Image (spheres, rainbow, N blue to C red):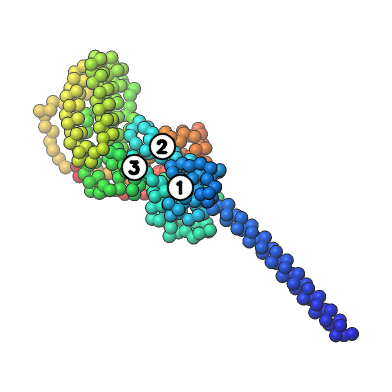
Amino acid sequence: MINSYSNYINNTDNLNSNKNTQINNNISSKQHFKQNKEINSNLVNDKSQAVDKVLGYGVDKDGFFTSDFNEAAGLPKDYKIYVNWIKDLDQTLTTIKLGSQALYDYVDWAKELGHFYKENLQNFDKFGANFNKEQIERELNITLRDNFTKNDVLQELFMSKGLKMKEAKSTLYGKINGFDNNIKQKDMSEFYAFMQKNQLKDANKIEKSSFKNIVSDTWMGIDREKSKLQTYVSYAVSFHLDSSLVQKAKDFESEFDNLMQEDLTLDEFKTKYLDFKQRHDEFVKEFETAMGDNLLVKPIDESFKPIQGESKNKETYKDDNTRNELVKKLLQTKFSTSEELELLFGMKFSNDDDTGEFVKFLSQNTRPKIIDIKA
């Protein structure tokens, strides 16, 4: 009888143990399924699920690139790249003329993001795990919101670096603004010194003029000269100068724009620019004569030679800042609403601030590299 009761107790314990094990296994299985489901929701969709194609890569129903983009870029599967972000960047930098020229003829975005990931993020990344927020902010000098994804980190860091591509074919405008990775820094410094030395004559000497230079003083070279050409046209029209002078001003502006579209090296551009400047200087003499008393400052007698001296204040060319100023101008014009900026950077921008918060955001995430120029 005792043996029977003992066997009963043992059998009951075994049943309960097996039941508990089964329950634990079921719970573990559900948790594992939930974890897998969460992980899978953060993984890029397979290229077989593409419903569209953009820039040569598949796009899923939610507007993200499919796995063929990640494969080409060498990005892990837990990166989902938002298609509209890449489309807008491509249009802004290669197609749309926002008061200037395109920076690149062509960009393979998968390659460029792949290069960028390997150089900047791969060492911090562990597949399936979130980035360490404090480490990323400290070591990469970016600011992240509390809830962020790996895509947010990639996009924000990519934008803050100034969009200088590794392999993309830059236009002449891209070259002279420092966006060509194949041009040595020494050559860029020499070019900016050349432009500083050979500036077009400034028309901003008109009394009571409401016109302002549209390009900030911190911008170097081409955009500064472009704004001067625009100013000559504005003044000639506003002060009702002879129609031939108005047309000359417009022709010089158009010629400069066409020059920027040619496929030239920096040295080839210098040669053509000097010829352009010589002819434009002659036009300026006609312009100043026609303006007469409207000139606030009379032309200086070129026979007068000022005393030469060496300034203790050495001018510097801030390479990354110059590029980022250009990118700010392009993106401010392209992305005009807070919703678009939020998609790009994962943080709120108010509509009534006219992108001021955006400029502040970019400027706080810039680490300029300063190189001395001796003009």
Q: Amino acid at mark 1?
A: Gln
Q: Are marks 3 and 1 in contact (CB under 8 Å)?
A: no
Per the image, label 2 sits on a secondary structure element best described as helix
For the residue pair 346 and 115, the one nearer the viewer reads as 115
- Residue 160 in view, yes or no: no
Please name the residue shown 73% across and 66% down the image: 23
Per the image, label 3 sits on a secondary structure element best described as helix
**Residue 180 x %, y %:** 30, 45
Please name the residue shown 43% across and 34% down the image: 334
Crowd around label 3: few <14 · some 14–19 · many ≥20 (10 Å): many
| Quadrant of residue 221 within the rendered picture | top left
- Which residue is denoted by mark 3 in the rendering? 323
Crowd around label 1: few <14 · some 14–19 · many ≥20 (10 Å): some
Image quarter where the C terminus lies is top left
Q: Amino acid at mark 2?
A: Gln
- Which residue is denoted by mark 2 in the rendering? 91
**Residue 186 x %, y %:** 23, 48
The correct choice, above or below, for 349 with respect to 140 in the image is above
- Which residue is denoted by mark 1 in the rendering? 155
Please name the residue shown 28% across and 30% down the image: 257
Per the image, label 1 sits on a secondary structure element best described as helix
